[in-house]
Each structure stands twice: as structure tokens, then as C-alpha cells.
Image (cartoon, rainbow, N blue to C red):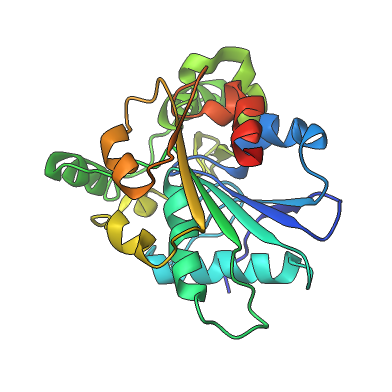
Amino acid sequence: MTQIHFELTEGGDDLLVLLHGLGATGAVWSPFVDAAPQHWTGRILVVDLPGHGASGRLARYDMPSVMKHVASVIDSSHSPGGSLRILGHSYGGVVALQLANARLGAEKQRPSPDFIYGLGIKSVWSEAELTGINQLAQKAPKMFAQKTAAESWYRKVAGLAALGEAADASLARGVMATEHQQWCLSQDPAVNAIGRLDMAALTAKLQGRYAFAYGEEDAMIDAANLATLDPGVRSIQGGGHNVMVNNPGAVWTWLGG
């Protein structure tokens, strides 16, 4: 089993799992976790998905392989009797929905999520977009002589470039040093090999167990499509794709609402 990096806060038996988006790390949730004491009394599990941050790499990133590693961390962190909720951002939201579907009807010793929150999920992909991101999976990592230059590139790739100092805490584990004294993104380029997403199939069996939201300035979102999947989909003011970074309180309000 590949090593998965995670951080688990103290608290009650209820567990909230945070899954980041493609190209980011669990550190993107730092402002959100910092705001937690006003909203959450349970524990929070923050995961670096396989091939991201400090987590190990996989031979392939098909969804069953990714889910298996994420599920193992969740299972070891969940307390019997406590609720289990997953908040997934973008790609992390898809992982959460896949996990919830896989756990439907599973044996009791493997906890099934009580609720899934999908934030900023890009539910519609054009052929050109799919082709472009899959081409990234074949490219060698971009190298930099200085860590600051690599972090600047990471800000752009992770969608944090426009957030300034608000995103500083979210840079952790985003870049790594190479054996040739250079710097590159810690993300394995192969994670970009994604397939077409069938959101209707992912949500069909989860009625009453999921909710979607997005930052009102998120240009990646097809709000009309999300509304067909969740008529109560929420537009969160004061942020774009990474709204949990620059407006974490609003995301907590959505969870509480």
C-alpha cells in the first residue's frame, strides 16, 4: 500500500474528511481548518491524495486505485458511532462521490459516508479540455532553479495565483526538491490522466446524501448542469474556484445550512 500523508485534528467522534482538487495538496484547506473551532466540534481529517503533496505515487490513477488508498486512511481514522462526512473540492469531490457509491451496502465494519459535500466540481468537460489535460499526463515535470519560482508556478497550477497572501499557508507540500538541486511540483503528472465524468450516474443512488456549491466567480463551473444534479446547489459569494481559501467562513456556513 502506498504511503498516504494525512493530518487529523483532535475533537469528538464525528469526522469531517477534506479532499483537495487536482494539482493541489491538503494544505489548501488550511484557512478552512483554522476557522473550524467556530463551526465544528468533531475531528477533521485532511488528506494529500495519491500522487500529490507528501503522499506516494501510484502505478496508475484509475478511480478504484485512488479510492482504495483514501478509504484506508478514512477507515483508520473513523470512530464507531461517529458520523462521517466528506467535503471534496473539484477532483476531490468526484473521489468522494465515487467512494460513497462504492460503500453503498458495504459491510458495517467499513463506514459509508453519511453525507458528501461537493465544492467547485467541474461537471462538464469538452473534448478539447479532456484532450488537453490528458496530454499533461505525458509531460515531464517543469523544473526550476529556485524554490520561490516553483512555488509561483504551483500557485498558478493550483488556482491560487490571484489570492495573494491569503493562499500562503496553502503552498505547503506543493513543490519538492529533486536530486539535481532543482525544484518542481510535487504532483505526479500522471494524475492528469482522467476520463469523462458521468455525474448523473455518480449521484443517482445518493439521493438526499449530497449537496453541491461553487464560488460565484468560478469560471470552471457549469451552474446550470450542477442545478440538474442538485436543485439546491449553492453559489457562494466572495470567491472563485478556491473559495474555501479566501472565504472559508462562507463555506462553513454552507455546511451548516
The structure residue drawn at horizontal position 27% and vertical position 41%, both measured from the top left corner, is 225
* Residue ranking furthest to the bottom: 107
Out of 143 and 6, give the one closest to the viewer: 6
Out of 174 and 25, give the one closest to the viewer: 25
Relative image position of residue 102 (x, y in whole percent): 46, 73
Rendered-image quadrant of the C terminus = top right
The structure residue drawn at horizontal position 86% and vertical position 51%, both measured from the top left corner, is 10
Location of residue 80 with respect to 220 vertically, above or below: below
In the shown orientation, is residue 217 left or right of residue 135? right
In the rendered image, which quarter is residue 1 located in? bottom right
* Residue ranking furthest to the right: 11
Asked whether residue 92 is in view, the answer is no
The structure residue drawn at horizontal position 29% and vertical position 45%, both measured from the top left corner, is 228
Relative image position of residue 2 (x, y in whole percent): 57, 68
Relative image position of residue 130 (x, y in whole percent): 20, 46
Out of 245 and 176, give the one closest to the viewer: 245
Out of 227 and 20, give the one closest to the viewer: 227
Relative image position of residue 179 (x, y in whole percent): 55, 45
In the shown orientation, is residue 174 left or right of residue 202? right
* Residue ranking furthest to the left: 127
In the shown orientation, is residue 90 left or right of residue 114? left
Location of residue 168 with respect to 25 vertically, above or below: above
In the rendered image, which quarter is residue 245 located in? top right
Location of residue 10 with respect to 204 vertically, above or below: above
In the rendered image, which quarter is residue 78 located in? bottom right
Location of residue 217 with respect to 185 vertically, above or below: above
Asked whether residue 252 is in view, the answer is yes
In the shown orientation, is residue 13 left or right of residue 194? right
The structure residue drawn at horizontal position 51% and vertical position 39%, both measured from the top left corner, is 24
